């Protein structure tokens, strides 16, 4: 029983990380049609900024806020200065975002080295809380709470604000949004900044959970985030949340109850099954 | 003239769709843009809205707008009701209308609900669950919510039952009292009821302009230009 609780809490923590990365990716793809491979670079930027600022000031909160703010600003700049010129051209977009990811990873390696750097983690986060006899690291609760707060905030933003309305409409039909007199470019920049800010938050949190920052941290999470986006349905924010939950738990249970390393295989099989039976994803709109 | 179009050309990929299309739309009433299947009617409206890449001059009430982006053209007072309505299916009627509100207003909800009382009853309904006729009303309502100088309406009768077409025609007659309309329509009975002027396109070129009544009263010309008799429909949009 206690191992099941532990695996469930670990799976939920993993799901929370996937959701934080995938929700931004999904919104960006849904509204702008951009497959943003540079998302992992913003995740790494968030992790390293949190590490540097926390190390310098001793304040973890300040470190995380600085990482999110810097990544959101860099995301807005990337969208308005680079991606906007390639609107609708998917091949240049992919080349640009892959190029940014490779260049940023190389830059991080050049400046900070290839080795992982220890992240200063508060003691209370490394402590454990016992639930049903299972010792669960407090960092897992931090991940879950962060994801729930982000989910609620994004749901409110999408449901209650004019920009949220523009985003939901833009996911359905971008051209018609502009034909109603709305400058959709502002919504693009805002959504890109929100997405990259969330990637940075995930980058900070993964650094806390793993106790280190490393140049490749973003890339490994990006693959599973893309899987979550596809399973949830491209452009569906609620679908991303559901898929993250599914992938995180299935991956963890398979690793524990089957074989270590089996989780990745099971997730890929899950992806294949969804693509074969429901190509639009769990909550995505059926393609014409 | 509210709209002056000069030498409009559109290329989509390797295809040259519009060839030096030039025409004028007089202030007030309905001007019909007619033609057979593939003549370039829908492409013309999309080019006017900067939704299709075009070259040439477009002047709205004397102001050059051909270099402007879609949202800037709309904010100058051009409303667009596209083919197939293109309402946001996942949003409610109320959200579709809120989205159409232009900053600074005014927003004529009274006018919209007086023309389309059914929409007022269905504000919380998702647009995608409404009938084709109701979706057409919503698409028109979005364009009528704001003050416009010109409305571009593409195939409003497409897919509607005959009794709804009659109802829609009467609504459009009221709309034409409020704002100038450039109407793409294949239902020639509707065109006869509404349009004062007509422009006929064939293979991306303007082949006829003049009084709608004159065009539609001449069976031979109508058959030659549109491929049908006066009571029928010409082809679908491109």
Image (cartoon, coloured by chain):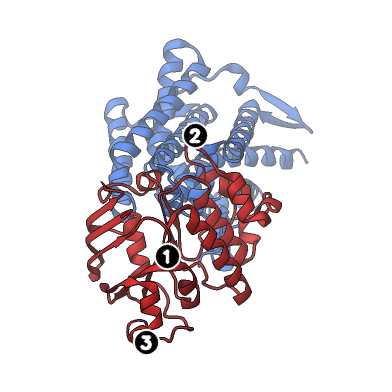
Chain colours: A blue, B red
- Residue beneath disc 3: B223
Instruction: Give the letter of the chain under mark 3.
Output: B
Q: Image quadrant for the N terminus of chain A? A: top right
Residue B183, label in figure: 1
Residue B227, label in figure: none
- Are callouts 3 and 1 both on one chain? yes
Q: Name the element at disc 3.
A: helix
Q: Are marks 2 and 3 in contact (CB under 8 Å)?
A: no
Task: Classify residue B21 as left or right of residue A182.
Answer: left
| Distance Cα–Cα, label 1 vs label 2 | 46 Å
In the foreground, B234 or A216: B234
- Residue beneath disc 2: A198
State which quadrant residue A159 falls in: top right
Residue B234 percent across, percent down from the top left: 42, 80
Camera-near label (1 vs 2) is 1
The residue that appears at 41% across and 79% down in the rendered structure is B235
Categorize mark 2 by other alpha carbons within 10 Å: few (<14), some (14-19), many (20+): many
The residue that appears at 35% across and 71% down in the rendered structure is B211
Residue A200 percent across, percent down from the top left: 45, 31
Camera-near label (2 vs 3) is 3
In the foreground, B47 or A224: B47
Categorize mark 1 by other alpha carbons within 10 Å: few (<14), some (14-19), many (20+): many
């Amino acid at each position: 029983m206690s191992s099941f609780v532990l695996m469930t809490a670990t799976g939920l923590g993993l799901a929370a990380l996937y959701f934080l990365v995938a929700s931004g990716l999904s919104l960006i793809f849904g509204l702008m049609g951009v497959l943003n491979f540079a998302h992992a670079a913003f995740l790494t930027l968030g992790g390293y900024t949190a590490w540097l600022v926390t190390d310098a000031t001793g304040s973890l909160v300040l470190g995380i806020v600085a990482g999110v703010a810097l990544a959101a600003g860099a995301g807005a700049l990337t969208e308005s200065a680079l991606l906007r010129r390639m609107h609708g051209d998917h091949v240049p977009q992919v080349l640009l975002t892959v190029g940014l990811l490779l260049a940023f990873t190389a830059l991080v390696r050049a400046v900070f080295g290839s080795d992982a750097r220890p992240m200063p983690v508060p003691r209370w986060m490394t402590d454990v809380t016992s639930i049903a006899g299972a010792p669960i690291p407090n960092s897992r609760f931090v991940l879950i709470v962060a994801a729930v707060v982000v989910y609620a905030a994004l749901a409110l933003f999408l449901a209650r604000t004019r920009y949220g309305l523009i985003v939901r409409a833009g996911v359905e039909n971008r051209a018609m949004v502009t034909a109603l007199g709305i400058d959709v470019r502002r919504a693009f920049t805002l959504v890109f900044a929100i997405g990259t800010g969330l990637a940075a938050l995930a980058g900070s949190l993964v650094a806390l959970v793993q106790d280190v920052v490393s140049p490749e941290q973003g890339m490994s999470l990006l693959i599973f985030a893309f899987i979550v986006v596809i399973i949830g349905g491209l452009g569906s924010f609620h679908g991303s949340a559901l898929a993250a939950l599914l992938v995180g738990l299935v991956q963890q249970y398979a690793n524990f109850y089957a074989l270590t390393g089996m989780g990745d295989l099971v997730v890929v099989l899950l992806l294949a099954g969804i693509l074969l039976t429901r190509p639009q994803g769990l909550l995505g709109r059926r393609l014409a | 003239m509210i709209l002056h179009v000069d030498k409009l050309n559109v290329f989509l990929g390797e295809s040259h769709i519009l060839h030096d299309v030039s025409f004028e739309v007089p202030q007030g009433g309905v001007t019909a843009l007619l033609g057979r299947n593939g003549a370039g009617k829908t492409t013309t409206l999309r080019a006017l809205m900067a939704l299709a890449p075009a070259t040439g001059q477009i002047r709205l009430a004397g102001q050059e707008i051909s270099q402007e982006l879609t949202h800037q053209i709309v904010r100058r007072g051009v409303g667009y009701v596209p083919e197939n309505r293109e309402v946001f299916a996942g949003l409610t009627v109320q959200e579709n209308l809120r989205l159409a509100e232009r900053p600074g207003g005014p927003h004529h909800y009274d006018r919209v609900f007086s023309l389309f009382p059914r929409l007022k009853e269905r504000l919380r309904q998702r647009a995608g669950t409404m009938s084709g006729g109701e979706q057409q009303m919503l698409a028109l309502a979005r364009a009528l919510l704001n003050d416009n100088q010109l409305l571009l309406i593409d195939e409003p009768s497409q897919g509607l039952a005959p009794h709804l077409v009659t109802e829609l025609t009467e609504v459009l007659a009221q709309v034409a009292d409020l704002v100038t309309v450039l109407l793409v329509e294949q239902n020639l009975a509707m065109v006869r009821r509404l349009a004062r002027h007509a422009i006929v396109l064939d293979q991306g070129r303007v082949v006829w302009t003049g009084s709608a009544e004159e065009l539609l009263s001449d069976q031979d010309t109508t058959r030659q230009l549109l491929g049908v008799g006066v009571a029928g429909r010409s082809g679908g949009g491109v």
